[in-house]
Image (spheres, rainbow, N blue to C red):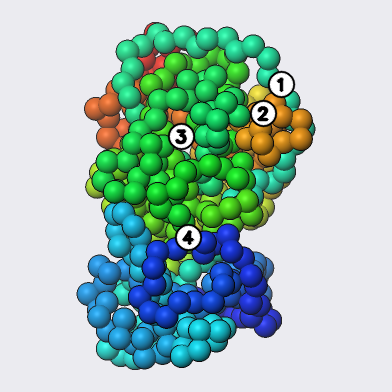
Amino acid sequence: MRKFSWFLSGAILVLTMAVLFSGCPSFDGPNPPAPYHCKGSVIVPLTSEGATGGATEVPYNCNEIILDPANPKITGWRDYLEDQGFIKVDSCSCGNKLELWRFLKNNPNDNDFNVIGIVEDPPPDVDAIAGTDPTGASLNYLLSFEPVDLDSIVDIGQRVPPETPCPVNPVKIAVVDTGVDIEGNLGNSILADFDWGLTTTGVNCPDAQALGFNIPQPSTPLIDSHGHGTSVNGVVAGIPYLNDVTMDLPLEFLNIKVTGGAAGSGSLFKALCGLYYAIEEGANVINVSWGYMGNQDNEEIPMIARCLDAAATKNIIVVAGMGNDHQNLNGYSKFLPASLAETNPNVISVGAIENIVNGTRAAFSNWGANPAEMTITAPGVNVISAYPKNLQSNATGIVRQSGTSFAAPHVTRTVAAIWSIDPGLSFSDVVTIIKNTASDGGGYRILNHQEALHQVCPDFP
């Protein structure tokens, strides 16, 4: 039985959300009904006292289970799920072949099922997912890509060309998000004004597009119908720095779309597929501006941790936002995958501050006094960045947004800049430079982009 005490909060809701499951590959079984969304929620304790010490609801797909084919007992799991009325409905198109199984029973319209019992109490020949030796099964959690708020549209004026005081090399950045605005050959976005056009073509996936890969709908464009991914790209490209000292970097953007539409929500399964695809395509740094709440007994941590371990073997840094739940994550509660910085040295977890000048922590940001769990903070309030013009009534291609979603890519840009100057550094070297050059925020570190670059390029102002 699982150590992580979860309690269902009310009746399971069955909602229609075509966004999450549109364009899936052909099914290994009967066709499902029209796209649907079977939603449940679990109560995640936020302190060591459990639910009595504070808790939050975390949504998941109540009729879906993720399996890892690397699991030595995968055959037993498959047989078990088939006996229970599940069929395999999806698998990652590239990289790790994670499998998504959905309850359909004999009647394709009968898909309201609580998977909690399945993952808690499987028969002995497949083992439960609790304990120190998890079998690689997971609930399929729901993820949100929504920013805290979308502020007034702004016009940043004329851009001053950045300096390039040091020799630089190409760095590949994977943005695992809602896609990117590429309509009209970037004519609808300010990204092109910031030399964003240096992109990479996927080389290890037959369905890869010129700018990356669309996980929900392979072989289709990465057009961003939500805006979140475009803004994250803009921060990495350097838009928030405006006329401040920055560098003209030969960054290569590999965009990996893990949501299907405008709602700004996705699933853990699609996100994990996206992370593995970024690893497969040789990204140097992966930006993760999403996640979900958990705690230290969460048996689904190993599935994400294995993905981060795979990145570490390729010398890849994963930069992850800590979430916008205003929770102290110093101890029992976690925000995944950011909190795994505590155990995975190639992960940089990023909290949000209001701005570099005063360094005040943003009211919405999760945080942690444990420096191993919250690596660093970066600006996350009223961050100026790109936005798809077709989603704006007064189309400027620029917005101000807030959230740890926009703090994380500040750090991603710093990581990329360090590696661009000195590509021979290990991920451990880069993380150490960022930590050691950070400013003191009074209990937490604040990113110091200029000082970090000065460490590897003394000529940097």
Residues marked 3 and 4 touching at CB (< 8 Å):
no
Q: Nearer the viewer, mark 4 or mark 1?
A: 4
Q: Amino acid at mark 2?
A: Ile
Of callouts 3 and 2, the N-terminal one: 2
Instruction: Rate crowding at label 4 as few (under 14), some (14 to 19) or many (20 or more) other CA atoms within 10 Å.
Output: some
**How far is disc 1 from disc 3 in space, using C-alphas?**
24 Å
Q: Are marks 1 and 2 in contact (CB under 8 Å)?
A: yes
Does 98 sit left or right of 292 as displayed? left
Q: Which residue is mark 1?
A: 155
Q: Residues within 10 Å of mark 3 (few under 14, many from 20)?
A: many
- Alpha carbon distance from label 4 to label 1: 37 Å
Mark 4–mark 2 Cα distance, whole angstroms, equals 30 Å
Q: Secondary structure at mark 2?
A: strand
The residue shown at (52%, 54%) is: 259
Secondary structure of the residue carrying numbered label 3: helix
Earlier-in-chain disc, 3 versus 4:
4
Circle on res. 412: 3
Type of the residue with mark 3 = Thr
Q: Which mark, residue 112?
A: none
In terms of image quadrants, where is residue 131? bottom left
